Image (spheres, rainbow, N blue to C red):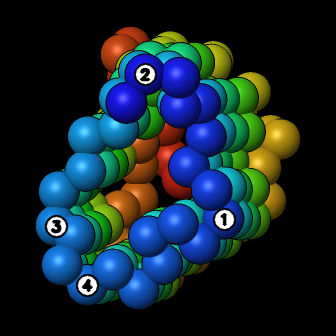
């Protein structure tokens, strides 16, 4: 819906029926635990404009397999994608240098995931936070 810029804290927490999410443009932040333990969520695509993903926002989404992050992303907070045991494909819409700037500001964000690299528009970067 028009005018919404943030997905609030714990907004979809434990929503077991949610399987696919494409977040619309206009969303600039996803707050802490917003999609925590959405166990059937398997795909997430963020529109350009998103800047911040909160602490444990997608943690324990144990079936999340694929993630598309926009080039506008500036910060991913600690444990945002921790315990996503099926997360194998991570794509970032910016360059490797852009990703390194995001990564430097972030804590451990990809704990306990099988993915080892993130695909940027100009190459692959090894994930630091595993």
Q: Nearer the viewer, residue 30 or 79?
A: 30
Is tag 3's residue or tag 1's residue first in the polypeptide sequence?
1
Label 1 to label 2, Cα distance in Å?
19 Å
- Alpha-carbon neighbours of circle 3 within 10 Å: few (<14), some, or many (≥20)? some
Apparent side of residue 26 relative to residue 93 in the rendered image (left or right) = right
Is tag 1's residue or tag 2's residue first in the polypeptide sequence?
2
- Decide: marks 3, 1 in contact (CB < 8 A)? no
Q: Residue at x 35, y 16 (%)?
A: 121
Q: Nearer the viewer, residue 82 or 22?
A: 22
Is tag 4's residue or tag 2's residue first in the polypeptide sequence?
2
Label 4 to label 2, Cα distance in Å?
26 Å
Q: Residue at x 43, y 22 (%)?
A: 2
- Decide: marks 1, 4 in contact (CB < 8 A)? no
Badge 2 marks a residue whose secondary structure is: loop
Label 1 to label 4, Cα distance in Å?
17 Å
Say which of marks 1 and 2 sits in front.
2
Badge 1 marks a residue whose secondary structure is: loop
> Which quadrant is the C terminus positioned in?
bottom right
- Decide: marks 4, 2 in contact (CB < 8 A)? no
Badge 3 marks a residue whose secondary structure is: loop
Q: Residue tagged by mark 2?
A: 2
Which percent across, then down, holds residue 8?
63, 56
Which dot marks residue 1? none
Is tag 1's residue or tag 4's residue first in the polypeptide sequence?
1
Q: Residue tagged by mark 4?
A: 16
- Decide: marks 4, 3 in contact (CB < 8 A)? no
In this view, 16 is above or below 110: below
Apparent side of residue 82 relative to residue 54 in the rendered image (left or right) = left
Q: Residue tagged by mark 1?
A: 9
Which dot marks residue 19? 3
């Amino acid at each position: 819906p028009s005018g919404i810029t943030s997905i609030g804290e714990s907004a979809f927490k434990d929503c077991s029926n949610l399987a696919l999410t494409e977040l619309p443009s206009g969303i600039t932040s996803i707050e802490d635990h917003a999609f925590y333990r959405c166990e059937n969520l398997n795909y997430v695509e963020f529109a350009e404009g998103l800047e911040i993903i909160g602490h444990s926002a997608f943690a324990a989404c144990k079936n999340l397999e694929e993630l598309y992050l926009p080039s506008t992303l500036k910060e991913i907070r600690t444990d945002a994608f921790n315990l996503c045991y099926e997360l194998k494909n991570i794509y970032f819409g910016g360059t490797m240098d852009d990703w390194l700037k995001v990564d430097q500001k972030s804590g451990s964000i990809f704990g306990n995931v099988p993915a080892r690299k993130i695909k940027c528009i100009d190459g692959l970067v090894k994930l630091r936070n595993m």
